Image (tube, helix red, strand yellow):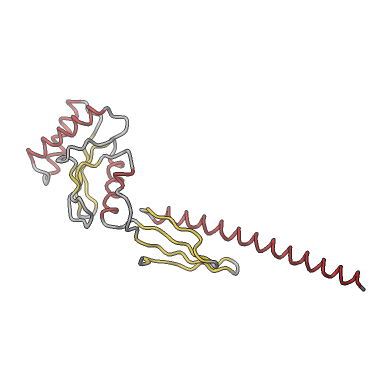
Amino acid sequence: MTALDGEQITLGHDEYRITYHADQCASNPREDRGHRSLLTVQGHSPREGWPLDEIDARVIPEVSCVPPEAKEHAVRAVSRFFETYGRDDSDRVERAYAVWHAISASPLRLFTGSVGSRAYFALAHARADADAEAREYVRWADGEVFGWILTGPDGEVASCWGYYDLATARGDWHSALRQDWLTRTRSAAIQRRERHRQARSAGAGFIGAI
């Protein structure tokens, strides 16, 4: 397991270290979520099963609050436009779907876009949903999912995996760090009080013996 990055943290007299690692066992985000709007994602990836093509696989997107028949009709429409214009002509496909969308009153809109060099098509309620899902899926496909391991004076404190963004990861390990340090601080204080109590007891016994 190779560390991607790391940093040293000092709290009081205690030294901690956080390291980030690639999550080689990250699960496909499309298997973990009920909301799946992506239809196709083109481009090369080291992951098995690329390029993503739910049209040819006849997979109906799981978009929330949309009847199954409406989703199936939308997928069939996109499939027809792919056959007519080709997948490389995203503008014509999107315009053709927009006309069909207006006539059919479908609750789903077709969005096209790209993440890096990878073009995608998605059926969703809003572009923000399609963009977010595409970015997450491409990051997984590129092996950019990661985890962290926090170590302290006594060894490993905590670890967690399956992150797509650094801000969320930092918030989680900061919480683990704070909890461990507070626990160690309280434990040290209890031990100090106990040593003082024992010292006083020993002193009182010595004086009594005199």
Q: Is residue 17 above or below residue 38?
A: below
Q: Position of residue 71 (x, y in %)?
A: 23, 31
Report the residue at 45% width, 67% height from top: 7
Q: Is residue 47 above or below residue 8?
A: above
Count the numbered circles shown. 0
**Extreme-bottom residue of the structure:** 210
* Quadrant location of the C terminus in the rendered image: bottom right
Report the residue at 33% width, 41% height from top: 33
Q: Is residue 178 above or below residue 79?
A: below
Q: Is residue 124 left or right of residue 20?
A: left
Q: Nearer the viewer, residue 97 or 184?
A: 184
Q: Nearer the viewer, residue 133 or 210?
A: 210
Q: Is residue 104 left or right of residue 135?
A: left
**Extreme-left residue of the structure:** 84
Kindly indicate the quadrant of the structure image that contains residue 198.
Answer: bottom right
Q: Position of residue 173 (x, y in %)?
A: 48, 57
* Quadrant location of the N terminus in the rendered image: bottom left
Q: Position of residue 184 (x, y in %)?
A: 61, 61
Q: Position of residue 145 (x, y in %)?
A: 33, 56
Report the residue at 17% width, 26% height from top: 103
**Extreme-right residue of the structure:** 210
Kindly indicate the quadrant of the structure image that contains residue 204.
Answer: bottom right
Q: Nearer the viewer, residue 154 or 19?
A: 154
Q: Is residue 123 left or right of residue 205?
A: left
